[in-house]
């Protein structure tokens, strides 16, 4: 047939076509965004990385395909149970499958993370089903060799070494002594912090006031200079 078709190809490169086209199909895409509060600016959105995508398909399967006029394939399997068995096998395999929708740009590869089927409204002539494909990103654990510990060099008496300063980054706990500002440029000078225990939430490299600090519970305070911050 020349119409749109929904083709499923399993991990063994075997393809079959869903006999009845779904009324709708949707691809779920989103990013892992977060919001922070900035003095005199309010909440701002920090765009995160893309989350795992998924696609969901719902349709029906005639129990007997003979004489059914609304099929999307010219040579279907005789029984709807055959399609149910194939979908169940794909779901249980936990291997990737590709869904291709002809006449569109949809070509989605993923694991069948959900599959359910049954009958509705007392209709014994067709199965209803829904499956969800979830994007799979290959990954594996990498074993890192640990180097042998070197013997610590003991400093000679009379020569003491000062401890290196702690690095400050996002999330660092710090002591703040200095004036707060509305932004990293220095606009809107506000209150002055004195020996206040705060947390770094944002860093603007190269700015005059590069550190945005919050209370330990996340309440925004403002931007301060580098010299006003000391690591705890």
Image (spheres, rainbow, N blue to C red):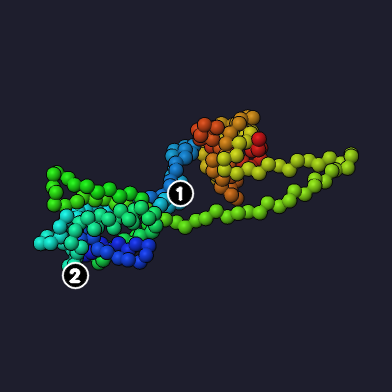
Q: Count neighbours of disc 1 (C-alpha within 10 A) and say few if under 14, some if 14 to 19, many if 20 or more.
A: few
Q: Count neighbours of disc 2 (C-alpha within 10 A) and say few if under 14, some if 14 to 19, many if 20 or more.
A: few
Q: Which residue is mark 1?
A: 48
Name which quarter of the figure residue 70 lies in.
Answer: bottom left
Quadrant where the C terminus sits is: top right
Q: Position of residue 33 (x, y in %)?
A: 43, 46
Disc 2 or disc 1, which is closer to the eye?
2
- Disc 2 + disc 1, Cβ < 8 Å: no
The reply, left or right, for residue 7 in relation to residue 64 is right
Name which quarter of the figure residue 229 lies in.
Answer: top right
Question: Residue sitting at 45 percent across and 49 percent down?
Answer: 48
**Could you tell me which secondary element the residue under label 1 belongs to?**
loop
Closer-to-camera residue (107/174): 107
Q: Position of residue 222 (x, y in %)?
A: 54, 37
Residue 116 to residue 220: above or below: below
Work out how far the residue at label 2 is from the one at label 1, CA to CA, in angstroms: 42 Å
Closer-to-camera residue (26/232): 26
Q: Earlier in the sequence, mark 2 or mark 1?
A: 2
Circle number at residue 2: 2
Question: Residue sitting at 16 percent across and 55 percent down?
Answer: 63
């Amino acid at each position: 047939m020349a119409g749109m078709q929904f083709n499923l190809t399993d991990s063994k490169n075997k393809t079959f076509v869903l006999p009845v086209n779904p009324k709708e199909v949707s691809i779920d895409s989103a990013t892992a965004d977060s919001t922070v509060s900035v003095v005199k600016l309010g909440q701002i959105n920090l765009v995160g990385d893309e989350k795992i995508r998924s696609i969901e398909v719902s349709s029906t399967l005639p129990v007997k395909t003979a004489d059914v006029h609304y099929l999307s394939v010219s040579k279907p399997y005789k029984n709807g149970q055959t399609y149910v068995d194939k979908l169940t096998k794909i779901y249980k395999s936990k291997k990737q499958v590709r869904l291709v929708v002809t006449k569109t740009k949809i070509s989605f590869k993923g694991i069948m993370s959900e599959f359910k089927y049954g009958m509705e409204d007392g209709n014994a002539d067709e199965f209803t089903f829904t499956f969800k494909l979830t994007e799979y990103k290959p990954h594996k654990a990498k074993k890192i060799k640990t180097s042998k510990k070197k013997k610590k060099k003991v400093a000679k008496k009379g020569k003491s070494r000062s401890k290196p300063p702690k690095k400050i980054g996002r999330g660092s706990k710090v002591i703040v002594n200095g004036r707060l500002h509305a932004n990293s440029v220095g606009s809107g000078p506000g209150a002055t912090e004195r020996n206040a225990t705060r947390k770094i939430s944002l860093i603007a490299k190269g700015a005059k006031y590069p550190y945005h600090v919050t209370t330990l519970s996340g309440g925004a305070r403002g931007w301060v200079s580098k010299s006003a911050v000391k690591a705890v």
